Image: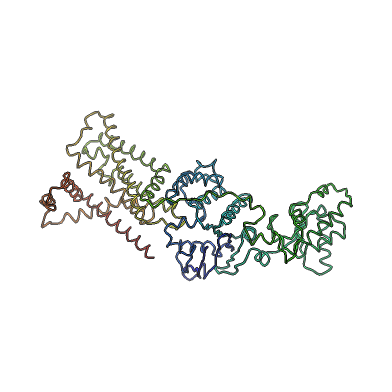
């Protein structure tokens, strides 16, 4: 059950709030429509409910606000606008990544893909999907964690009639299994046709909260649908009689042999047709243009049945030469349904009146689309969940692979060029790091991959369907830092290996010797690439942009290193001589495995301008990230 209380958006400058004091309920087992013209505040209302937008008010999902629910995606399935996924990611890859994020087994992907009808498109990329297929994928993401509540923003917008009917069937099936469904739409006919309750917004305010039958009767224009081979003649007669009686009746000629009559009743039209001997194939009350699935009011059933029966009797005794009367033996489906059920008095509700009050008893309820099987046992919280998500995110698109290949090729060519020019020390030659460049290609590549780890989350927020922005959880940050570290380490090793191989192929063994201080150089090299990757991750997480993450990586050698060098270049009164010996004195016993030697080596790395600047930058970025995380939790 959804309980929205006093939802009010923050006003923008001098403009009034887009949503002002909206309160309503959406009950389980029913489909609720949020209706309003474009700009009425439907999307803003949904975003306020899901805490994606700042404002006042609160929304309870089965008695708890969203920020108090440990796993929001298990309680609420959300579909807002298009699927927030990378265009190069496949359907199966997108759903598998979301599976890892919400903690459901990977087999759930195949179950949901089969239900939404995307089995043949599971390997298609998101950027190639049509509007209908994108809606199906969005619904699959919403159903993936087996939520109790579905919240959808204009789910049928831009879909064909058949696709819209299928989507609404899925929503009806979810409600029939006890779930709560809330969707927004700007089409009143769609709301009356598919929902059990209609909540109407106008100008950001709640103007009506009605059952669908009451909404259709009071807010939609009723009409009588007529089908006759002599539709033109019947229309002229109805208009003539309306003018004579000074009644407001509008007759609209539809396609083929159909009429839509506004301001009249089935009984009046049937009597007119009977007096003039006009054959009628269909005569039914409808609400607006709701189509053949509209329910008939109970008081109109008897008249429609009587008129249809009378006209059929007269049709069998009145021959006609018009070839279009061959359809006289075939009664339209709604008329057949009326004749079969018979007339019901107001004291004896028939199937049409029960259709709105009991969704599960709708005619054809057995033919509702099948939902994915429920998740019987949910996985316990595990620290490997964010790691699995990050691995699937990083390996699901080719950006990382393309970046790594570009780094290796650029580094190999630079090393050959530097060796040809000469005057380059061997460590810089192996790293392909010219003195004119602030960072080597491997460090820049590691920083870019680190920045993409969080930058793509904000550009294509797969984790944001239930909370809006990327969750700033420390587990997710640790997973991204770990994957970025492994990627940077592999990139550093492969870069040196490719450079050595390229130098050997071009110049022989002259330039491929191992330096004497290879251990400290290796530590410095790995520390540089991993540090750049971490700086990219943290900066992109803080500033929510890949560009900002890469800019933070470049700012270390361009801005921070000169500042550190300027600071260290000043006069020094004391020096850190004997640092290694004092480290040994911290413990009464000897450091295990020569730990003091490694700590001293790390201290020497930090004491270097680049190492110190990188360490300073990482510390500042980490503190800023933690501060923004705590600030968000307080809000």
Residue 141 point in image, percent of width and height: 50, 51
Q: Is residue 269 above or below residue 503?
A: below
Residue 426 visible in image: yes
Residue closer to the observer: 37 or 173: 173
Residue closer to the observer: 184 or 171: 171
Left or right, 421 with respect to 358, comes to left
Residue 92 point in image, percent of width and height: 48, 44
Residue 154 point in image, percent of width and height: 56, 57
Q: Quadrant of residue 416?
A: top left
Left or right, 174 with respect to 479, comes to right
Q: Tell me how many marks there are.
A: 0
Residue 93 point in image, percent of width and height: 46, 44
Which color scheme is applied? rainbow
Q: Quadrant of residue 446?
A: top left
Residue closer to the observer: 7 or 504: 7
Residue 157 visible in image: no
Left or right, 560 with respect to 42, comes to left
Q: Residue at x 87, y 60 (%)?
A: 275
Which quarter shows the C terminus? bottom left
Q: Residue at x 53, y 49 (%)?
A: 372
């Amino acid at each position: 059950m959804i309980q929205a209380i006093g939802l009010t958006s923050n006003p923008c400058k001098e403009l009034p709030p887009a949503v002002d004091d909206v309160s309503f309920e959406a009950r389980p087992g029913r489909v609720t429509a949020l209706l309003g013209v474009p700009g009425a505040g439907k999307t803003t209302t949904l975003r306020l409910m899901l805490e994606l937008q700042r404002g006042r008010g609160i929304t309870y999902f089965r008695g708890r606000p969203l920020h108090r629910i440990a796993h929001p995606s298990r309680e609420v399935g959300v579909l807002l606008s298009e699927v927030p996924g990378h265009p190069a990611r496949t359907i199966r890859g997108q759903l598998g990544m979301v599976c890892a994020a919400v903690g459901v087994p990977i087999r759930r992907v195949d179950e949901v893909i089969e239900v939404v009808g995307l089995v043949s498109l599971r390997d298609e990329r998101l950027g190639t999907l049509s509007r209908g297929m994108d809606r199906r994928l969005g619904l699959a993401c919403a159903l993936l964690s087996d939520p109790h509540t579905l919240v959808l923003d204009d789910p049928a917008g831009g879909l064909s009639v058949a696709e819209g009917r299928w989507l609404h069937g899925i929503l009806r099936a979810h409600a029939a299994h006890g779930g709560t469904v809330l969707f927004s739409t700007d089409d009143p006919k769609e709301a009356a046709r598919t929902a059990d309750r209609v909540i109407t917004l106008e100008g950001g305010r709640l103007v009506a909260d009605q059952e669908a039958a009451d909404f259709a009767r009071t807010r939609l224009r009723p009409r009588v649908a007529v089908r006759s081979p002599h539709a033109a003649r019947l229309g002229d007669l109805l208009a003539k009689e309306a003018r004579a009686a000074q009644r407001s009746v509008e007759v609209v000629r539809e396609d083929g042999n159909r009429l839509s009559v506004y301001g009249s009743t089935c009984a009046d039209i049937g009597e007119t047709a009977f007096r003039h001997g006009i054959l009628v194939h269909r005569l039914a009350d409808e609400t607006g243009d709701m189509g053949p699935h509209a329910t008939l009011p109970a008081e109109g059933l008897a008249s429609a049945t009587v008129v249809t029966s009378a006209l059929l009797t007269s049709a069998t005794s009145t021959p006609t030469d018009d070839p279009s009367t061959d359809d006289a033996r075939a009664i339209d489906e709604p008329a057949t349904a009326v004749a079969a059920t018979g007339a019901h008095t107001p004291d004896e509700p028939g199937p049409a009146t029960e259709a709105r009050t009991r969704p599960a008893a709708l005619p054809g309820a057995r033919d509702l689309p099948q939902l994915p099987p429920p998740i019987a046992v949910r996985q316990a919280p595990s620290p490997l969940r964010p790691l699995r998500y990050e691995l699937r995110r990083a390996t699901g698109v080719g950006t990382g692979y393309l970046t790594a290949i570009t780094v290796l090729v650029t580094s190999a060519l630079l090393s050959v060029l530097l060796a040809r020019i000469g005057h380059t020390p061997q460590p810089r030659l192996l790293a392909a790091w010219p003195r004119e460049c602030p960072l080597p290609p491997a460090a820049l590549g590691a920083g870019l991959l680190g920045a993409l780890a969080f930058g793509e989350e904000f550009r294509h927020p797969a984790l944001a369907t239930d909370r809006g922005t990327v969750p700033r959880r420390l587990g997710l940050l640790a997973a991204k830092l770990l994957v970025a570290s492994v990627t940077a380490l592999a990139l550093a090793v492969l870069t040196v290996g490719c450079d050595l191989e390229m130098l050997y192929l071009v110049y022989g063994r002259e330039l491929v010797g191992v330096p004497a201080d290879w251990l400290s150089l290796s530590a410095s090299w790995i520390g540089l690439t991993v540090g750049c990757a971490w700086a990219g991750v943290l900066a992109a997480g803080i500033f929510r942009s890949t560009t900002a993450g890469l800019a933070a990586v470049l700012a270390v050698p361009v801005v921070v290193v000169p500042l550190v060098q300027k600071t260290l270049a000043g006069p020094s009164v004391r020096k850190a001589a004997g640092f290694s010996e004092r480290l040994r004195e911290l413990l009464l016993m000897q450091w295990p495995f020569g730990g003091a030697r490694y700590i001293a080596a790390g201290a020497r790395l930090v004491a270097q301008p680049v190492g110190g600047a990188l360490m300073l930058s990482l510390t500042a970025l980490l503190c800023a990230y933690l501060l923004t995380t705590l600030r968000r939790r307080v809000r």
